[in-house]
Image (tube, helix red, strand yellow):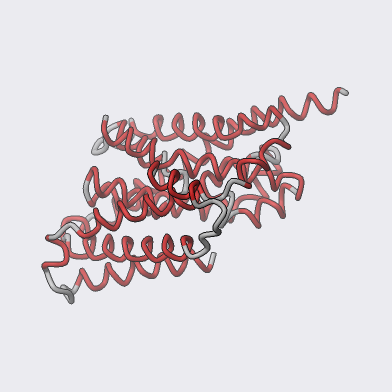
Amino acid sequence: MLLGIAVGYLFRNRKIRFIHRIILTLIWLLLFLLGLEVGSNENVVRQFGTLGFEAFLLATAGTLGSVVFSWLLWLTVHNKTTNK
Amino acid sequence: MKASLVILSFFVTGLLLGLFHWFPAELLTYNISFYVLCALMFSVGISIGNDPTSFRQFRHLNPRLIFLPLMTLVGTLLGVFAVSFFLKDRSVADCMAIGSGFGYYSLSSILITQYKGIELGTIALLSNIMREVITLLLAPWMVKYFGKLSPISAGGATTMDTTFPIIIRYSGKEFAIVSIYHGFIMDFSVPFLVTFFCSL
């Protein structure tokens, strides 16, 4: 990735517009391959419900944690501006 | 939202083909996904290096708001850390790796599959998609109770693309730059944090 940043920076005067298409295509390809692997792995298919539940817990907790912390920052920024 | 559905449909297509074994078995033995992943990381790097304007825009920020990505990071990791004690099958580091996807489900699930296997990769995919959906659905509620920065934090790495319109709508236009800055920093940190927690 760092190599990519360096290459991109070297060519910064030339707009590389097609790179976003390439990224999107690669992501499609990789998720297709991931789907293939998940589908052909019977162990994972059998546990899909449990995995989904674990995913839900992690997503909720992560989001909630970040929301609470952003609230703390919001309070400090907000108080500063209203006191003025 | 449409782009996410397209991406998801690729995963589901793969899933169905795999389920019914409608593909040549050699496709999985050659580890193609690793090489595609390398190509992807290279391309992501090019797109970051190729866009110097995105660095310059960040000078017009309220200095305190520079800490927002840090808040997102700490909050998310504490949240998943707390939950990891209830998930007996998963180690703390595994949960942290999933949490550091910050909603960037395509990249994080691919990385985690590569390092930790297919099971954890699937959780990462589902969990990070859910994070995006939660943000899209609950943004108005978050603004009401947790202030205008909260949907930006909740959106994680997606605040410069998929959740951007929602954030502008409920937090206001003046948060557009913060949202893009936040998404940019989180996007950038995903590959590093995920690989870091996977290596623990």
| Residue A67 x/y as whole percent | 58, 37
Residue reaching furthest bottom? B22
In the image, taking residue B194 as reference, residue B131 lies left or right, namely right
Up/down of B140 relative to B68, above or below: below
Q: Quadrant of residue B1?
A: bottom right
The residue positioned 26% from the left and 37% from the top of the image is: B90
Q: Residue at x 59, y 46 (%)?
A: B52
Is residue A30 toward the left or the right of residue B149 in the image?
left
Q: Position of residue B198 (x, y in %)?
A: 28, 36
Front position in the image: B36 or B52 = B52
In this view, the residue in front, B43 or B150, is B43
Q: Position of residue B70 (x, y in %)?
A: 54, 30
In the rendering, at what x and y percent does residue A57 appear? Answer: 40, 43
Q: Quadrant of the N terminus of chain A?
A: top left
- Relative depth, front residue between B92 and B188: B188
State the count of labels.
0
